[in-house]
């Protein structure tokens, strides 16, 4: 069964195509934060990956984008067995064994996303939420126009922090925002060069597959 009261579940909230999965890739550099991928998550737990090995996996996402000259990203679906818009009764039926196990442990943080402008994971009351803001420049670069302006219902979340996507334009600003997020989640990333590499890689590949 799923333990909905897990304290190790992290949700990144952002409108589709606005770059929020960048945060999942950065946070997964931390030794006790898992990538959005079933096999990578299993291997990290089994082999107790170092920060360097974790960074190599996050880096490979952007290397693969360049190789195929298209948009590419890791996804929670194979890890969990469902997406954010599935109700908790169906989640219990669809959930992978790995997802169930992750909800019953406290060594590793695991992550999912939410594209709705409200908390789609309310049945996980202790989840930690990261809500992006100032993401409009990413949508603009990708020629994406939202049908409705994305205003997140903060009242639907008891536990959240915000992330300023505009910070990605400057190394120091981005580092400060990531440090804030790491402290909020409860992880550390010692090698700051890894963080900056992912920042630069995102900026280099942000339009691949969109234009």
Image (spheres, rainbow, N blue to C red):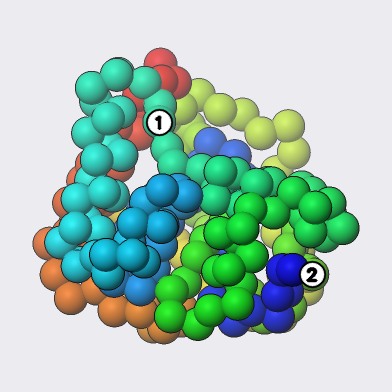
Is 175 left, or right, of 90 in this rendering?
left
Residue 37 location in percent, x, y? Answer: 45, 48
Regarding mark 1 in the picture, which secondary structure is present there? loop
Residue 172 in sight in this render: no
Q: Is residue 117 above or below residue 2?
A: above
Residue placed under numbered mark 1 in the picture: 72
Residue 2 in sight in this render: yes
Say which residue appears at 15% left-offset and 61% top-offset: 52
In depth, the one of 90 and 165 nearer the eye is 90
The quarter of the displayed image where residue 99 is located: bottom right
Is 134 left, or right, of 168 in this rendering?
right
Rendered-image quadrant of the C terminus: top left
Say which residue appears at 61% left-offset and 29% top-offset: 145
Say which residue appears at 30% left-offset and 28% top-offset: 65
Is 114 left, or right, of 130 in this rendering?
right
Rendered-image quadrant of the N terminus: bottom right
Residue 149 location in percent, x, y? Answer: 70, 43
Which mark, by number, is residue 131?
A: none
Q: Is residue 205 above or below residue 132?
A: above
The quarter of the displayed image where residue 176 is located: bottom left
Residue placed under numbered mark 2 in the picture: 123
Say which residue appears at 43% left-offset and 80% top-offset: 107
Residue 101 location in percent, x, y? Answer: 58, 68
Residue 50 location in percent, x, y? Answer: 19, 67
């Amino acid at each position: 069964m799923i333990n909905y009261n897990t304290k190790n579940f992290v949700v990144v909230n952002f409108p589709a195509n606005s770059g929020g999965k960048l945060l999942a890739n950065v946070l997964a550099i931390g030794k006790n934060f898992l990538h959005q991928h079933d096999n990578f998550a299993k291997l990290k737990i089994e082999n107790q990956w170092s920060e360097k090995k974790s960074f190599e996996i996050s880096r490979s996402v952007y290397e693969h984008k360049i190789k195929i000259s298209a948009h590419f990203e890791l996804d929670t679906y194979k890890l969990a067995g469902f997406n954010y818009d599935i109700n908790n009764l169906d989640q219990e039926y669809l959930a992978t064994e790995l997802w169930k196990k992750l909800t019953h442990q406290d060594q590793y943080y695991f992550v999912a996303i939410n594209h709705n402008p409200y908390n789609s994971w309310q049945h996980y009351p202790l989840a930690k939420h990261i809500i992006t803001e100032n993401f409009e420049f990413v949508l603009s670069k990708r020629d994406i126009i939202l049908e409705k302006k994305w205003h997140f219902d903060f009242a639907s979340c008891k536990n959240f922090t915000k992330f300023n996507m505009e910070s990605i334009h400057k190394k120091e600003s981005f580092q400060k925002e990531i440090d804030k997020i790491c402290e909020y989640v409860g992880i550390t990333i010692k090698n700051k060069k890894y963080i900056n590499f992912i920042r630069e890689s995102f900026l280099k590949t942000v339009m691949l597959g969109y234009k």
